[in-house]
Image (cartoon, rainbow, N blue to C red):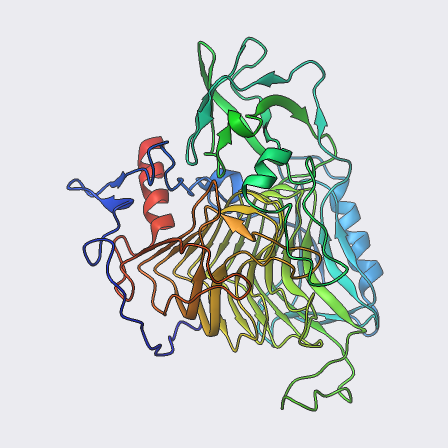
Amino acid sequence: MLRSLLPFALLALPLAAEPGTSRLVRLGEEGRLVYAPWNERGDRIPDFSTCGYRGGLVPLPEVAAKRVLEPVPGDNRERIQQALDELAELPLEDGFRGALLLKRGRYEVEGSLRLNASGVVLRGEGDGEDGTVLVATQRKQHTLIALGGGGRRQEVADSRVAVADAYVPVGASTLRVVDASGFTPGDPVIVHRPATAEWIAAIGMDRISEQHEKVTQWAPGSYDLRFERVVVGIKDNELELDAPLACALDEAFGGGTVYRYTWAERIENVAVENLRGESEFDRAKADPKREGEFVDEDHGWNFISVGAVRDGWVRQVTARYFGYSCVNILSPASRFTVRDSACLDPVSQITGGRRYSFAVAGQLNLVQNCRTRGGRHDFVMHARVPGPNVFVDCHAEKAYSDSGPHHRWATGTLYDNVVVEGHSLNVQDRQWSGSGHGWAGANMVFWNCTAKSFRIQQPPTAQNFGIGCQGPLEKGNWVKDHPDGWWESPGVPVNPRSLYLQQFAERQARVN
């Protein structure tokens, strides 16, 4: 994968810590991370190592092929879908039914393919032009490969209890409830953080500047966060969770509740790997302003979308000419890994709602070692995201817009050694953008990242961080007088090189 860096002019700023070291997370004398809170309430940078397939500690499996196909002339959609459906009827063995292996060659596909049963893997023989290539031939916007079950999360009746702590800080993985007798270790739970009128007023999102008629002020109840967690321990009325919280619970703003949930139709152990997707498009629709760009929009839009899936992966895939994304992780997805993949040369107008190369709306997801060329918001978070999530060792070339959280209080994403050539990494108050994007993100961490510039603003009730980053810190695009976020060691990368990989190694050592 491309890992070259463009030289960037660095703005000389006063250091907030010794060069090469963060005051918030540093390597101690024994080579393990030492954390310090950023305020008197105990908020700290979270442990992001629980993101990804099976919570991060289980290697991506190698699943035996149970069906094999070779390409035929014309549309291959029906025969590929039939093979996937046949796999879906096989019994589960150690969580898997088997893989469909598509042999090397080009497979025209008119429409969408669906993986909607647990334990099914779609695999090719390489993501190069001479590998397994799925060609999206349908001349309208569509998803080529859709992963996911159905239904929705259901609250278990009479299981909801109030959080007893006056304040549960960012980064905490324990909390007290008024009565823990209804919980047992292994329970899947929701930690519910309400969006009250008082909190919305405190962050100013009931006073978004109405620069156009589409602006909508944030409404109570519409910005609640629901953190999916598993209870791993109980002591008295204290619950220990499998992953930390990415946004604080404060009794001044409604506190929080915890309840058990079920989701019978969500699937697991599904994957797409080692293949390439290309979208046909009208080459007569060239962009008159940009050489080599095309603006046709009636063609394949997403190569892969991930819906109601918990525990799955995409690895070693390349998407070319799609209008929106290589992998679009939707809000029902959790603990999903995307690794060693590329989104190249998208075809669309270069404007809003297009070219979101690797987009995340779910929680506890990991995007690692991925690259893009010609995207807009290449490594992007959507709205109301209850983190954590991670982008690590990712590289955007020829970026037409910024990366970072895009709108409406996405929380707790780590951007770790992310490079954006020619554009910026931002987390800021986007105010009247769209229909009132407002504060795009909170408790976001840019760690040893490189970009043309950074805009990192501190929202009320939260914080954002740029640590060891290369590129100047600039004022916001919409509101310039917000305070800057936490900005440490500019131009000097800090140790460890990768926060995520260090956290992962320490957690792996604890478990083993």
Q: Number of numbered discs present?
A: 0
- Residue closest to the eye, 451 or 407: 407
> Viewer-proximal residue, 153 or 265?
153
Q: What is the quadrant of residue 475 in the picture? A: bottom left
Compared to 220, does 125 lie above or below? below
- Is residue 464 visible from the viewing direction of this image? yes
Task: Quadrant for the N terminus, please.
Answer: bottom left
Determine the residue positioned at 68% across, 38% down: 267
In the displayed structure image, the side of residue 404 where residue 434 appears, left or right: right
Residue 31 drawn at (x, y percent): 20, 43
Residue under the image location 29 percent in, 45 percent down: 25
Given residues 230 and 406, the one toward you in this image is: 406
Location of residue 3 in the rendering, given as x and y in whole percent from the top left corner: 40, 71
Nearer to us in this view, 319 or 228: 228
Residue 292 vs 35, above or below: the answer is below
**Which of the 4 image quadrants contains residue 415?**
bottom left
